[in-house]
Image: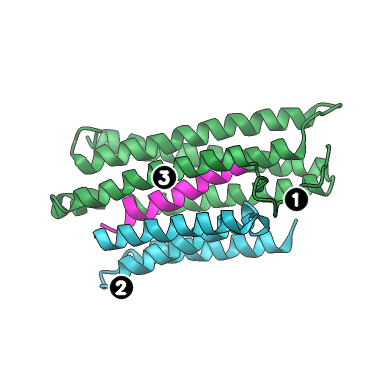
Chain colours: A green, B cyan
């Protein structure tokens, strides 16, 4: 692992890299605007939104939050250990990061299956249009994140690994972005209406 | 394993479970409390897991500014 000293206090070098932070802000703004639109649409029919929200499983949402945050915790630990040149430990924790990400997807699939069985489809009403669009868009980000983390893992596994700490930090920043988006989605979609 | 990461994770778990429990209540303060808990979790992940606390003040202002604007607009729109 090549460890170079990065001056994070320099405005052009935030942890994870400036390009990734531009992407993170674009994503946060996109999801943020969509969630605000959802809140404004509530005013058209508050009863429908409240009743639709009651069909969502808050326990599943809470467990999914726990899974994603735990995955994010292991990601942060992985980056820290790589900076300490503890490659073997870091690889194990990276696997745990991915495992919790996969568990998130498994629980989300169970939740989606229940919604489909109950007939709550994307066109059922405005609330469920937002629910499906926003959560599916987030799930796509989680899948992309898992692909990126897998590529980092196999890069680290090589005997003569050329993976740089900057690459791992950028991948970690993308993965944490999925946490940040979920932390906004979960209360607005599952809890407040 | 860094102690600070463990502490952050424990706090995030407590806040998540608290959000779930608070949401079952019908009291008037529920919405602002849920939004506030979400904001604390967001800050925890951004500053401790993503290491934004080491970043330039510009990035810190940007992320906190985004969060305040989002929570503020959502609360006022409800």
Local crowd at mark 1 within 10 Å, few (<14), some, or many (≥20)? Answer: some
Taking depth in this image into account, of A182 and B10 the one nearest to the observer is: A182
Q: Which residue is mark 1?
A: A7
Q: Split into 4 quadrants, where in the image is the N terminus of chain B?
A: bottom right
Q: Which mark is residue A29?
A: 3
In the rendered structure, the answer to whether residue A192 lies left or right of residue A89 reads left
Range drawn in magenta:
A173-193
Q: Which residue is mark 2?
A: B29
Q: Secondary structure at mark 3?
A: helix
Which residue is found at the position 62% from the left and 51% from the top?
Answer: B50
Are callouts 3 and 1 both on one chain? yes
Local crowd at mark 3 within 10 Å, few (<14), some, or many (≥20)? Answer: some
In the rendered structure, the answer to whether residue A15 lies left or right of residue A118 reads right
Corner quadrant of residue B53: bottom right
Label 1 chain ID: A
Residue A91 in percent (x, y) is at 75, 39
Spatial separation of the CA atoms under disc 3 and disc 2 = 27 Å
Which residue is found at the position 33% from the left and 35% from the top?
Answer: A133
């Amino acid at each position: 692992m090549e460890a170079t000293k990065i001056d994070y206090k320099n405005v052009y070098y935030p942890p994870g890299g400036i390009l990734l932070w531009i992407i993170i802000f674009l994503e946060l703004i996109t999801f943020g605007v969509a969630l605000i639109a959802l809140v404004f649409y509530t005013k058209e029919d508050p009863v429908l939104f409240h009743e639709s929200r009651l069909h969502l499983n808050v326990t599943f949402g809470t467990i999914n939050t726990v899974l994603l945050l735990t995955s994010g915790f292991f990601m942060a630990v992985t980056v820290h250990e790589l900076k300490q040149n503890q490659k073997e430990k870091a690889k194990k924790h990276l696997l745990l990061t991915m495992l919790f990400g996969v568990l998130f997807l498994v629980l989300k699939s169970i939740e989606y299956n229940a919604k489909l069985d109950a007939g709550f489809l994307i066109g059922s009403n405005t609330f469920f249009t937002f629910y499906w669009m926003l959560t599916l868009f987030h799930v796509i980000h989680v899948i992309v994140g898992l692909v990126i983390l897998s590529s980092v893992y196999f890069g680290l596994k090589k005997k003569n690994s050329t993976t740089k700490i900057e690459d791992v930090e950028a991948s970690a920043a993308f993965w944490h972005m999925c946490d940040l988006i979920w932390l906004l989605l979960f209360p607005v979609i599952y809890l407040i209406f | 394993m860094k102690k600070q990461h463990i502490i952050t994770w424990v706090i995030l778990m407590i806040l998540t479970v608290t959000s779930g429990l608070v949401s079952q209540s019908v009291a008037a303060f529920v919405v602002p409390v849920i939004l506030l808990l979400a904001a604390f979790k967001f800050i925890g992940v951004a500053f401790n897991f993503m290491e934004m606390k080491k970043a330039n003040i510009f990035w810190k202002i940007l992320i906190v500014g985004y969060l305040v604007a989002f929570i503020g607009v959502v609360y006022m729109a409800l």
